[in-house]
Amino acid sequence: MERLDALRERQAAQQQIVDDIQGSFGTIRAELDEALAEVETEAAGVRLQRAEFAEGLDTGLVAVYEKTLAKRGVGAARLFHGTSEASGMKLSPGDLAEIKAASADDIVFCPDSGAILVRSDEWS
């Protein structure tokens, strides 16, 4: 009988440990669900801002951006001091010469990443 009582006490102690762990998991899951809901709310706001911004852009340019984004993972990036911020690579003198020869209205692409390069005053 003493052995049976000892085993029952041990079982009760182990069951308490299991119950504590399950309670912790429930708390963690609730915190995770709350965080995910916050992220989704923020993402919805960003999607709305993006849609509003895209309304003011040329639809053809937006289509090229979307296609590039889907294919390459980066739609557009800045060309800064001869370096593509899409690939992190410094462009060759030949690539830079081609970009310089392009019209300001032309879409130019990063030769390494394929992303659209956004030229600014300090691009070269």
Image (cartoon, rainbow, N blue to C red):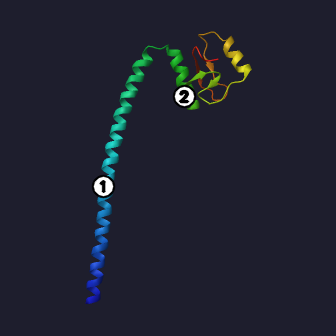
For the residue marked with disc 2, what is the amino acid?
Answer: Leu
- Marks 2 and 1, the one that precedes in the sequence: 1
Which residue does the image show at 36% across and 42% down from the upper left? 36
Which residue does the image show at 69% across and 18% down from the upper left? 96
Where disc 1 sits, the SS reads helix
Q: Which residue is mark 2?
A: 69
Mark 2 → mark 1, Cα distance in angstroms: 38 Å
Pointer 1: residues within 10 angstroms few (<14), some, or many (20+)? few
Q: Is residue 29 above or below residue 117?
A: below
Viewport quadrant of the N terminus: bottom left
Rendering quarter of residue 12: bottom left
Q: Nearer the viewer, residue 41 or 121?
A: 121
Q: Which residue is mark 1?
A: 26
Q: Nearer the viewer, residue 80 or 54?
A: 80
For the residue marked with disc 1, what is the amino acid?
Answer: Gly
Pointer 2: residues within 10 angstroms few (<14), some, or many (20+)? some
Asked if residue 13 lies left or right of residue 64, the reply is left
Looking at the rendered structure, which numbered label has been put on residue 42?
none
Number of marks: 2
Q: Nearer the viewer, residue 43 or 120?
A: 120
Which residue does the image show at 71% across and 16% down from the upper left? 97
Viewport quadrant of the C terminus: top right
Rendering quarter of residue 10: bottom left
Which residue does the image show at 36% across and 30% down from the upper left? 44
Position of residue 92 measured from the top left corner of the image (x, y, whole percent): 72, 24
Where disc 2 sits, the SS reads helix
Asked if residue 75 lies left or right of residue 47, the reply is right
Q: Is residue 46 above or below residue 39?
A: above
